[in-house]
Every structure is written in C-alpha cells, then in structure tokens.
Image (cartoon, helix red, strand yellow):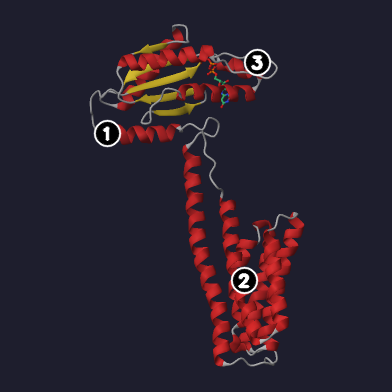
Amino acid sequence: MMSVQPSAEDYRNRAALVMNNILFFGSLGYTLFWGSLGFELLIVLNISFTFWYFLCFYPLSKQQTLLAKNMLFYGLILHCFAYSNFLFDKQSGMHLYAIAIIPTSFLVYSNEEGIHRISVILCAVFLLWSTELGLFPNGYYSLSTTQNTIALLIALSTIVAGSIAIMFVFDATLKNYQLGLTRISQRDALTNLQTRRVFMDKLQLRFGDTDNGPNNDYLLMLDVDDFKTVNDNYGHHIGDKMLIHISQQMSKGLKEQDLLARFGGEEFVILLCERSIEQVKQYSEQLLEALQQNPLKMESQPALKRSVSIGISEVGQNYHLSLKAADRALYNAKNNGRNRYVVV
Ligand SMILES: Nc1nc2c(ncn2[C@@H]2O[C@H](COP(=O)(O)OP(=O)(O)OP(=O)(O)O)[C@@H](O)[C@H]2O)c(=O)[nH]1
C-alpha cells in the first residue's frame, strides 16, 4: 500500500509555524523590553502583533487569514518604520527587524499570495534603506548604549534563530520533496507496483553482467487473459480496477526480497528469489486459484473474473535470456488455452 508522506506544502506550513513562533517570542521579548523602559504604547503594539501572529494560524476563511497576514506584516513594517525613523535613532537597530520579515514572508504567504509577498519585501527594503540613509528626521528618543545593545540583540537573535530554522526546515522540505519524486518515478501510477525500469535495474544489481549460472531464482512473466474485453464491455475505468485487483492478488505470497513490477499494459513480471521449482509452481497455482475465487466486485453488476497466463524460467547464466525464455513460456501458456503456467 502507498504510505501517505507529508507533502512539501505540509513542510512549508510547519516551517511557517516555526518561524512565527520565533517572531512571536521575539515580539514577546520586545514587549518585556519596552515594558522595562516604560513605553506603554509599544507594549500595546507588540501585543497586537502577537494577536495577528495568532490569527494567521487560527483556522479562518482563506480571505480572513490573508487579512491577518497582511495586518501582521504591514503593521510590523509600519511599526519598525516609525521606531527607527521617528521614535528612536537608527542605532536602536529597530530597522534590522525588517531583515527577518523578508524570509518570513516566503513562508507565511502561499505561492498564490506571491503579490503580497513581493510588496512586503519591497516595504521592508524601503524601511532598511530609508533608515540607513537617514532619509527621515532622527528619532526623538535616544536609547542608552546598553538599551541599544539589548534592542539590537533581540532583533538579531530573532533573525539568526529564524534563519537557522529556515535552513533546517527548508533542507528537510527539499530532501522530502526529492524523496517523494524518486518514489513517484519508481512506482507505476495505477497499480503502485515498481516500474519496468526499476525492475530491470534491480535485476542488473542482483545478477550483474557476469554469467553466474542457476541460483534458485525464477522469473515469471504474467499477462491478463482477454483483458481487452474488460475495457470493451465495461469501460476503461473498470479495466483499471481489474489491473489493480490482479496486482494485489499477485503480491500475496511474495517475500521481502522478491520483486513484482508492471512490465507494461496488462503484463507483469515477478522475480521469486531462492525458491525451488515446486515452490514456484505452488505460487503460480495459488495465484490462478485466487483469481478464480476472488473476482473483481462491482457495484451494480455481477463480479468480474479474469485469469492470467504465466511463463516461468529459472534465472540462468544471463538474466536477459531468462526473461526471453519466460516470455516464450508465456506465449505457450496463451496458445495452450490461457489460465495456466508453463515452465521452460
Ligand atoms: N484499462 C486499461 N487498459 C489497458 C491499460 N494498458 C493496456 N490496456 C489495454 O489492454 C488491452 C490488451 O489487449 P490485448 O493485447 O489484445 O490482450 P488481451 O485482450 O488480454 O488478450 P490476450 O492477452 O491474448 O489474452 C488493450 O485493449 C489495451 O488498451 C491500462 O493501463 N488500463
């Protein structure tokens, strides 16, 4: 069965949460800091931002969440702008908070909200630029060196912690995404079995190019009998369900090191490892029987039965030749009446 992996989107949401927590605590730090200096207005402002952080992740409608995000970012930028240009002098480091805003906007806004992200970044850049150049009148209050250092430390530690979180979480996201892509490319989309290419690569890994001689591994080529009539009589979607159903039956009785792949269309291939020919025959008989006993159940019609034909060959000195031999055996099984196996 296909396991449900967290998507890149899930990781992005988690990253946004981590980042927001960091900013939340940064904001809390500032609240305490302004409190210790007696700036009541700044305490209230910081609490309001904490409230917007909270709303960004509270389950609301899409539009309300977007509003909360905008309130948070534009409010934060305005707040830093007022701090660093009018209230305090630029040494207070308030404008540096904008550096944390830039990467955060990538996480908090979704890709569809890119336009908001761009405008937030432009505003943050303007804030940094205007403060650095002293474009506006200098701040009214001047913080002492220690106070400046504390304010700067809070801003910088928020930025550093945020950047570290981004590095880690993005790394995990990327790895997960790549893993997901690899998994997808190795699996057949319909049956979730391995693809022909992966199967051939694994045969190559197991047997290599050298002539090894027989080693109790068997190749089975399988083809669904009269499958075209399933599509013709019941439609393609029932044909698809039949392929899934048959592949599930095939996977029963396989061991961990065995391989099962969809070779193409209604053709499958199996490698049974370290078995005697009797065991291979037994597996084949059980599969033929299971398909008779477990037809595909349908909602408003009688259950639908299909058999398979199987060609079997032992993996000999060259696995390519063994595959061809199994294919010939399959051809014979078809010609001899289907719903059977033939060993070469
Ligand atoms: N629904 C569905 N049909 C597929 C898929 N891949 C291949 N097919 C169909 O499988 C059918 C194979 O038909 P044939 O090659 O004539 O084989 P058959 O009807 O099984 O006859 P025999 O093999 O001779 O028993 C074709 O109609 C293909 O369109 C698939 O992924 N889904």
- The residue located at (43%, 28%) in the rendering is 260
Q: Of the numbered discs in the image, which one, if any, rests on residue 269?
A: none
- The residue located at (59%, 89%) in the rendering is 91
- The residue located at (47%, 12%) in the rendering is 289
Q: Amino acid at mark 3?
A: Asn
Q: Amino acid at mark 2?
A: Ile
- Contact check, label 3 and label 2, Cβ < 8 Å: no
Where residue 164 appears, as percent x and y from the top left, is 49, 67
Task: Name the residue that disc number 3 marks.
Answer: 233
Q: Quadrant of residue 124?
A: bottom right
Q: CA distance from mark 1 to mark 2?
A: 57 Å
User: Which circle's residue, 3 or 1, is located before the other in the chain?
Assistant: 1
**Disc 2: CA contacts within 10 A as few (<14), some (14-19) or many (>=20):** many
Q: CA distance from mark 3 to mark 1?
A: 45 Å
In this view, the mark in front (1 or 2): 2
Where residue 62 appears, as percent x and y from the top left, is 74, 55
- State whether residue 78 appears in this view: no
**Horizontal arrangement in the rendering, residue 148 relative to residue 328 (left or right):** right
Task: Name the residue that disc number 1 marks.
Answer: 209
In this view, the mark in front (3 or 1): 3
- The residue located at (38%, 31%) in the rendering is 256
Q: Amino acid at mark 1?
A: Asp
